[in-house]
Image (spheres, coloured by chain):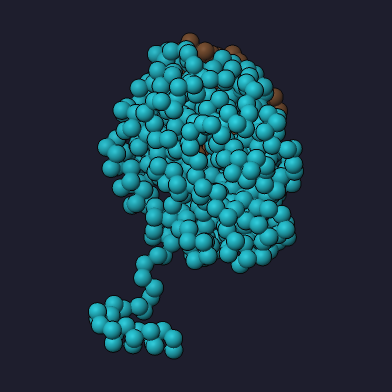
Chain colours: A brown, B cyan
């Protein structure tokens, strides 16, 4: 069983317009690697060159903001849903 | 970005969008995050020559600065709430109480829905209409909900506002009355914000003013800075204390001051910008103290709900501005907030919202800590109206005061009891 990943509009050029794609479970880092294998370049928009989550992107596993969990080491079990959202909103 | 939305035809002298992080530029349009790095997009201009006289000849609203905003030239003639040009009140009694030489208060209660949010919504609405959006929407801590519902009603378009379910009853009532859709959401503002971001991707003709229209929306806060300078007689204050929720207001007031210098409308004098947060939601103050340039999100717990944003979008830029200008970001607890609300009311006859209490409370804290110069002319922002946060202010009849009979004797007895 895989995990589903919600893709924001600005990254849908990588997914041929798909708003939701599947990836392999694991840690968030592994999920992103699996995504990048299917959609080359996608992970680089979410993680910077130093391998950290970019400053202005929020990633949720289920309802949990991964910055409140273990960041890129947050577990993403099979069947869960990952959401990638631009952080610049609100206020 | 969204396919049903047309290319903008008229954004005044705004010329492009650019990413604040990586500098990538893009055409004016319906996007708010950089496609390269997710960084926030900012409106760039090719500003025309602007004179003090041309501004002074304009309307008594934010539209006197229309040529410095991403709006069409005829914006003032379209149905809108005509926000802004609120008073800059000299606060001598409060200044004496605090030991300050000169203190001014920018009184944002004077806006159509009693907070500064009418400014940003008016700019967002004008831009959203230009881009062909059909619905005005927002996630809100309350003030923005009021402003969006009112502006949409006035412009004759639909509105949808998403609010945390535990919002103050006054703010809920003052939104519902305008007849738009209001959806209480279980969770914090940050949860509501997340939902709004997902919806903004899903509903192509909805303009979430502070999400997908945010670059335009945020520009509206520049008008607070323009007005302060104009009302001081075309000069900049030496110190300013601004409440920090997302941080956009503080960043835009600084942008306004720099633009006025660039345009030659004010002298290039040194100013320091200070940010104010409630201790129960103080991620930017914590980052400032720790010397960090990133902001670790927190889960908010404060009576200052209009500032309860645990993951502030402009937090890093607030840090940039206060460090560049020699200011600081500080926080105060809820008790000091209530005390400050009462102090402002008793000394100046101004009943501010909880965020105003935060701002004044932090002003006192900064003075006590020696970070704010008592001899420098200071401006504070009174962002909204205490009538919207009545319960927090503990504004009921003072404890132990009972009603008296309607007779002279009863009144005289009350007077002697009070004197005793």
Q: At x 47% / y 29%, what residue is drawn?
A: B123
- Foreground residue among B111 and B231: B231
Residue B18 appears in the picture as rendered: no
Residue B47 appears in the picture as rendered: yes
Q: At x 48% / y 26%, what residue is drawn?
A: B213
Can you say which quadrant of the picture contains the C terminus of chain B?
A: bottom left
- Foreground residue among B114 and B299: B114
- Tell me where residue B356 appears, x and y as whole percent: 51, 54
In this view, B2 is above or below B416 = above
- The answer to whether residue B163 is left or right of residue B409 is right
- Tell me where residue B283 appears, x and y as whole percent: 59, 47
- Tell me where residue B34 appears, x and y as whole percent: 58, 22
In this view, B244 is above or below B152 = below
- Tell me where residue A80 appears, x and y as whole percent: 44, 31
- The answer to whether residue B261 is left or right of residue B228 is right
Q: At x 40% / y 18%, what residue is drawn?
A: B132
In this view, A37 is above or below B330 = above
């Amino acid at each position: 069983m895989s995990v589903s990943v919600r893709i924001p509009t600005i990254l849908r050029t990588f997914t041929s317009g798909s708003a939701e794609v599947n990836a392999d479970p694991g840690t968030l880092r592994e999920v992103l690697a699996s995504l990048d294998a299917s959609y080359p370049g996608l992970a680089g928009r979410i993680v910077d060159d130093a391998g950290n989550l970019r400053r202005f992107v929020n990633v949720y596993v289920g309802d949990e903001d991964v910055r409140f969990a273990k960041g890129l080491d947050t577990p993403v079990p099979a069947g869960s849903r990952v959401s990638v959202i631009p952080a610049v909103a609100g206020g | 970005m969204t396919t049903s939305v047309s290319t903008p035809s008229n954004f005044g002298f705004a010329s492009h969008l650019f990413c604040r992080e990586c500098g990538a530029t893009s055409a004016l349009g319906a996007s708010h995050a950089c496609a390269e790095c997710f960084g926030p997009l900012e409106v760039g201009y090719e500003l025309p020559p602007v004179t003090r006289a041309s501004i002074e000849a304009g309307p008594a609203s934010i539209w006197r600065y229309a040529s410095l905003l991403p709006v069409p030239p005829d914006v003032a003639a379209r149905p809108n709430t005509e926000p802004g040009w609120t008073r800059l009140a000299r606060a001598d009694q409060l200044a004496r109480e605090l030991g300050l030489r000169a203190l001014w208060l920018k009184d944002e209660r004077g806006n159509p829905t009693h907070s500064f949010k009418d400014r940003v919504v008016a700019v967002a609405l004008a831009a959203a209409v230009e881009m062909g959006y059909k619905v005005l929407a927002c996630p809100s801590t309350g003030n923005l909900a009021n402003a969006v519902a009112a502006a949409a009603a006035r412009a004759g378009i639909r509105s949808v506002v998403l609010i945390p379910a535990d919002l103050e009853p006054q703010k809920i009532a003052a939104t519902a009355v305008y007849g738009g859709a209001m959806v209480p959401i279980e969770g914090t503002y940050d949860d509501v914000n997340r939902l709004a971001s997902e919806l903004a991707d899903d509903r192509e003709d909805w303009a979430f003013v502070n999400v997908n229209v945010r670059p335009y929306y945020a520009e509206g806060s520049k008008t607070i800075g323009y007005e302060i300078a104009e009302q001081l007689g075309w000069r900049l204050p030496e110190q300013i204390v601004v409440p920090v929720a997302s941080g956009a207001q503080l960043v835009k007031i600084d942008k306004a001051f720099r633009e006025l210098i660039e345009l030659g409308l004010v002298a290039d004098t040194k100013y320091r910008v200070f940010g104010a947060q409630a201790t129960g939601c103080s991620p930017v103050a914590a980052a400032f103290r720790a010397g960090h340039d990133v902001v670790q999100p927190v889960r908010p717990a404060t009576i200052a709900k209009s500032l309860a944003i645990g993951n502030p979008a402009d937090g890093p830029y607030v840090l940039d501005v206060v460090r560049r200008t020699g200011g600081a970001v500080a926080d105060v607890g809820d008790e000091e907030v209530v005390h400050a609300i009462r102090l402002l009311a008793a000394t100046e006859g101004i009943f501010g919202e909880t965020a105003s209490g935060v701002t004044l409370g932090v002003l006192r804290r900064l003075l006590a800590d020696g970070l704010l110069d008592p001899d420098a002319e200071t401006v504070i922002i009174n962002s909204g109206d205490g009538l919207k946060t009545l319960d927090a202010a503990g504004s009921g009849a003072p404890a132990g005061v009972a009603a008296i009979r309607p007779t002279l004797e009863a009144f005289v007895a009350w007077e002697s009891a009070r004197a005793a």
